[in-house]
Image (cartoon, grey):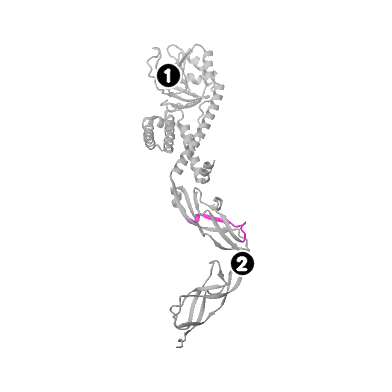
């Protein structure tokens, strides 16, 4: 749970859009190419990628390198070997189907009309080839069809396959209650175990059934016999009742309803897999390209009691080690990172304030790795004013024949502002060191005051320098 929280806390809205956009693109590719060999190869590449990431995680360097080479070769194979299928899918799609259309693979088909039309064709010995696509698409298998989009009827089937019409030799594609395409060329089967009386129509029907899940009806021109092909099976139809039963089983109302449910479930699962896959890829790249940076960030104190002032803190800035993607780390600036410590519960005296994660504001996509120090000592007190005497701080030694007779300070007292607890124990303010070694005569020296601790301040308007006026006389010679 903690790992998941660390992964998601740094997500920016741009990252969410990035994941959703690429997930949708992957889902659209699945919708366009499902049922083709291309999608199977893509799924195989996806499995290889998962194995490659697992190898990286386990530290299998050679295995990871080998799988990467296989993935690159497989991507090239898809483009070269399946270029005809890819071109066929792209050529048969309109603008809408590329971006948001969901092709209906299973639509309720008027079975009775097809049965009547087929047996009328058989009675007249008119050869016919009728295709009913089911779950998978056949766009990548058929060729050179003529768009028709006519209402399905017995008369329409007769007119299409009537001798002498330009389209009677090809296949008619039926989807729902529409004849969507005519004169379509189907792939011929290469099987050698087919009956000798099977003609070109039968071989074309078997070829399509082998490469798709479509239901193909053939009416023999010579014998007037009806045969239905599904997968590797050839079903000889003896009467219209048997044909109706076969069509109801594979393309009837119940089958269409269950087919739509299966399609909705399939697309839903595919969408979830696409989202999970792109999310995994994003995290793999985002975390795999992680970079580190250390910044010194000044501390801001908030919600201090207005009657108290901060007189000292153990540190004025904090060192933060941050991580994120290389591009984000390179663009980060120190003013984008804030440390704000809450002093609402602080009291007069020494307070230990922890630097929690909630106190640190980071840009989106940046994670906090380390804080140094993890706690600050902050001294708060009520400010007071106190007048203190000034004491010169002599250092060194006068010459043996000299005596420091007098020293007067101008001014000799100073008003200091500081915390009440601090000033309670301070009774004198000292000057900086005044060396005696070089003094030979009286004079005046200007020196600075030493304010210890450093949080002490002089009253507004006062200068931090005073004059020390001193007198020196010679030591009387000793009497003999």
**Residue name at image x 56 percent, y 78 percent:** 412
Q: Which residue is more in the foreground, 371 or 45?
A: 371
Residue at the disc numbered 1:
206
The residue carrying pointer 1 sits among few (fewer than 14), some (14 to 19) or many (20 or more) residues within 10 Å by Cα, namely: many
Q: Is disc 1 placed on a helix, strand or loop?
A: helix
Dot 2 crowding, Cα within 10 Å, few <14, some 14–19, many 20+:
some
The magenta stretch spans residue 341: yes
* Image: 160 above or below 197: below
Q: Nearer the viewer, residue 430 or 451?
A: 430
**Residue beneath the point at 46% across and 49% down:** 328
Quadrant occupied by the C terminus: bottom left
Vertical comparison of 413 with 287: above or below: below
Which residue occupies the extreme front position in the image? 480
Give the answer, above or below, for where 66 lies relative to 189: below
Looking at the rendered structure, the secondary structure element under dot 2 is helix
**Which is in the foreground here, disc 2 or disc 1?**
2
Residue 379 sits inside the magenta stretch: no
Distance from disc 2 to disc 1, alpha carbons, whole Å, reads 101 Å
Question: Which stretch did the figure color magenta?
Answer: 334-348
Identify the mark at residue 420; answer none if there is no mark. 2
Q: Is residue 356 visible?
A: yes
Where is residue 22? Give x, y as percent: 47, 39
Q: Is residue 333 among the parts visible in the rendering?
A: no
């Amino acid at each position: 749970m903690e790992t998941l929280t660390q992964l998601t806390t740094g997500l920016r809205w741009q990252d969410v859009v990035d994941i959703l956009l690429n997930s949708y693109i992957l889902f659209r590719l699945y919708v366009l190419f499902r049922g083709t060999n291309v999608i199977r190869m893509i799924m195989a590449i996806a499995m290889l990628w998962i194995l490659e990431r697992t190898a990286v995680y386990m530290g299998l360097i050679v295995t990871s390198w080998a799988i990467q080479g296989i993935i690159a070769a497989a991507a090239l194979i898809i483009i070269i070997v399946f270029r005809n299928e890819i071109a066929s899918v792209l050529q048969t799609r309109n603008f809408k189907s590329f971006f948001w259309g969901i092709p209906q693979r299973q639509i309720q088909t008027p079975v009775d009309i097809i049965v009547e039309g087929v047996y009328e064709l058989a009675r007249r010995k008119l050869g016919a080839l009728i295709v009913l696509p089911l779950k998978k698409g056949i766009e990548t298998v058929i060729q050179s069809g003529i768009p028709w989009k006519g209402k399905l009827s017995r008369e329409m089937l007769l007119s299409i396959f009537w001798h002498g019409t330009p389209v009677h030799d090809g296949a008619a594609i039926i989807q729902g209650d529409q004849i969507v395409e005519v004169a379509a060329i189907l792939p011929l089967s290469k099987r050698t175990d087919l009956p000798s009386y099977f003609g070109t129509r039968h071989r074309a029907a078997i070829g399509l059934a082998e490469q798709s899940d479509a239901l193909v009806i053939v009416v023999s021109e010579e014998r007037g016999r009806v045969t239905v092909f599904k997968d590797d099976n050839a079903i000889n139809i003896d009467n219209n009742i048997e044909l109706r039963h076969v069509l109801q089983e594979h393309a009837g109302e119940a089958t269409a309803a269950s087919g739509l449910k299966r399609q909705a479930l399939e697309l839903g699962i595919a969408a979830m897999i696409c989202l999970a896959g792109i999310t995994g890829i994003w995290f793999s790249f985002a975390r795999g390209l992680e970079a580190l940076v250390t910044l010194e960030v000044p501390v801001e104190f908030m919600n201090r009691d207005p009657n108290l002032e901060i007189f000292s803190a153990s540190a004025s800035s904090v060192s933060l080690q941050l991580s994120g993607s290389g591009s984000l780390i390179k663009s980060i600036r120190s003013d984008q990172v804030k440390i704000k410590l809450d002093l609402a519960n602080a009291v007069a005296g020494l307070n230990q304030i922890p630097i929690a994660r909630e106190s640190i504001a980071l840009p989106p996509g940046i994670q906090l790795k380390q804080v140094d120090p993890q706690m600050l000592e902050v001294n708060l007190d009520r400010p007071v004013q106190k007048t203190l005497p000034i004491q010169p701080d002599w250092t060194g030694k006068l010459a043996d024949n000299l005596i420091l007779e007098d020293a007067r300070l101008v001014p000799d007292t100073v008003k200091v502002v500081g915390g009440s607890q601090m000033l309670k124990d301070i009774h004198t303010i000292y000057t900086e060191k005044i060396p005696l070694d070089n003094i030979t005569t009286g004079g005046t020296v200007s020196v600075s005051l030493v304010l210890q601790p450093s949080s002490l301040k002089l009253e507004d308007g006062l200068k931090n320098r005073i004059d020390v006026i001193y007198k020196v006389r010679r030591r009387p010679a000793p009497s003999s």
